[in-house]
Amino acid sequence: MGLGTTDKADLVAVRPASVGRMFLDRVEATPSREAYRYPDGGGWSSLTWDETKDRVWVIAAGLLDLGIEHEQRVALASSTRIEWILADLAINVIGAATTTVYPTTTPEDVAYILGDSDTRVVFAENAEQVAKVVEHREKLPQLTRVVVFDGHGVDRHDGFVLSLTELEERGRAALAERPDAVDDALVAVGPETLATLIYTSGTTGRPKGVRLVNDNWVYEGVAVDAFKILSVDDVQYLWLPLSHSFGKALEAIQLRIGFATAVDGNLDNIVEGLGAVKPTFMAGAPRIFEKVRARVITGVENEGGVKAKIFAWAFGVGAKVSTLRQQGKEPTGLLKFQYGLADRLVFHKIKARLGGNIRFFVSGAAALSRDVAEWFHAAGMLILEGYGLTETSAASFVNMPYDCRFGTVGPPAPGTQVKIADDGEILLKGPGVMRGYHKLPDVTAEVLDADGWFSTGDIGEVVDGYLRVTDRKKDLIKTSGGKYVAPQEIEIIFKAVSPHASQIVVHGDTRNYCVALITLDPDAITEWAQHHDLGGRSYEDLTRAPEVRALVQGQIDQLNARLERWETIKKFEILPHDLTIESGDLTPSLKVKRKAVEKKYMDVLDRMYA
């Protein structure tokens, strides 16, 4: 069994006792600095750390007035917004625990999660989320109230539903009677107090509640602080789902370091938001970076002419500079001059669209294509890929701006240990590891041993202290000829090759060759069609067009040229619609539910072997 570990545990040995204590430490350190920025009408409003504390304390007092006690669960069913953060902090400050619910969760799964977690109060974003809770209210006898952020059109159900304003009014009244109520509750919160139940959507099966305690999140904040890659002067643009561990980790990291965060979970507003906020860093799933790259490339290709030639020249120059910088060198002479010109003509415009002040992006939640990372790097923008799971509080590894190695997820965070099992599985141990699955001791024992080692289910290797993740263990394909294929690696390459693809699912387990299901990016293929005499056709019509199939076949040929013979895609089908979260094809973090997709389209797959 190979071993690759960290010797920096001393950097995280001393840490605050709880999330609430870490929050108070931040308020006391920088009370008048900006903490949060959020959309408000047509502009952005701001909260200082002191103002944030005042609002959090009022909401916390309101929860105490509703009868919430130590480690009882309070759910958040909402997209990412400032109220999500304020409510989550209030829950943790009084020693209760947040149950996270994605806004895309079905009513049936909402009922299951609320019931399994014994949730007492739900914060719901709007009428749609309230309706999901109320639909199965009779199955949830422990549920006492719903607090709604946006009350427009919401039935109050005889007082069962409160507005956030009404909860805050109750909180102010409670604090007038007992000014120390929240402070007293916070004193009782310790490192092992349950902080969060995150129900993993997973790629198969029923959601499992991951039990994460206060020390898990405090560790994340302290560990990333120890890397010294962020400072109090940074500005974050936060759009990631806070129901996902990646988003929650960013919340904890901010409490420790103290940078300002602009909060807006509406993806339709992201370009406009980046321009207004001008952040210094932003985290995202790989699909976001793939779409940015694809949109730029297809836009230039469709225009053609001199602009396309200048673009190709600039990225050729950028690729040379990227290679040098990966070796720790800087361009000189003619190359330096050419890169400066390329930046003025091409790269500066791309960076300006993303706010103009980005120091780096952080990619997580799924594997990032090296091609995509190097494309951004060629344009002067660094993507730091990281790695972690919900069960390890998200941020277990991350690349460094001063030593970023593309194709890896970086070194382990201080205090985290990693070793590779004989079959290649990545095993992790450290303060970020969960305390188990809620009410599932037998399932917990399958992945978490008596010594604290967590089996990730991922295959990888450690080279010079940096982790490279290959694929999910359960997703590895063994062909009928006995050859092993890592489908995720193939899928990542294809999405870098094809700016028109949205998703690809490689299939071939126990079969004699590999095939693929492909979906197209609706915007990219529609724009391509307009420049190839196919404008006005529906998405479904385009997926059947011979010209589109020829386009994709050419991209498959490029992919196959980079693969071993037994890995090549012999046949493919373009599906008539994209994969979505709502249809059950993707997880909320945009990962493909491979088994679900294969089952849904088994007839299509079988035809490719007929």
Image (cartoon, rainbow, N blue to C red):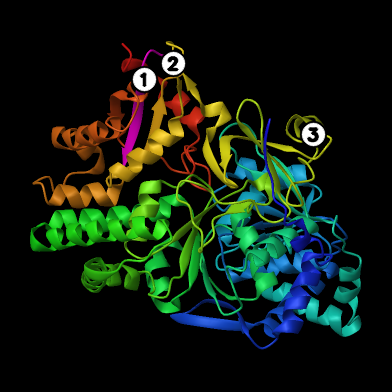
* Residue 580 among those drawn in magenta: no
Magenta stretch: give its range.
510-520
Callout 2: few (<14), some (14-19), or many (20+) C-alpha neighbours within 10 Å?
some
Q: Is residue 344 left or right of residue 504?
A: left
**Is residue 112 in sight in this rendering?**
no
Residue 291 place in picture, x, y as percent: 35, 53
Q: Is residue 92 above or below residue 497?
A: below
Q: Which residue type carries mark 3?
A: Asp
Q: Is residue 20 left or right of residue 556?
A: right
Name the N-terminal-most of marks 1 and 2. Answer: 2
Is 224 positioned to the left or the right of 342 in the image? right
Do labels 1 and 2 touch, CB within 8 Å? yes
Residue 603: x %, y % from top left? 38, 19
The residue under the point 49% across, 65% down is 282
Residue 389 appears in the figure: yes
Q: Give the numbered dot on residue 566.
A: 1
Residue type highlighted by circle 2: Thr
Dot 3 lies on which element?
loop
Res 193 → quadrant: bottom right
The N terminus lies in quadrant? top right
Q: Nearer the viewer, residue 16 or 201?
A: 16
Q: CA distance from mark 3 to mark 2?
A: 32 Å
Residue pictured at 33% horizontal, 73% vertical: 352
Q: Which residue is mark 2?
A: 479
Farthest-out residue, front: 333
| Label 3–label 1 contact, CB within 8 A | no
Helix, strand or loop at mark 2: loop
Residue 234 x %, y %: 54, 76
* 517 drawn magenta: yes
Can you identify the residue that label 3 sits on?
449
- Write the residue at 46% across / 39% down: 583
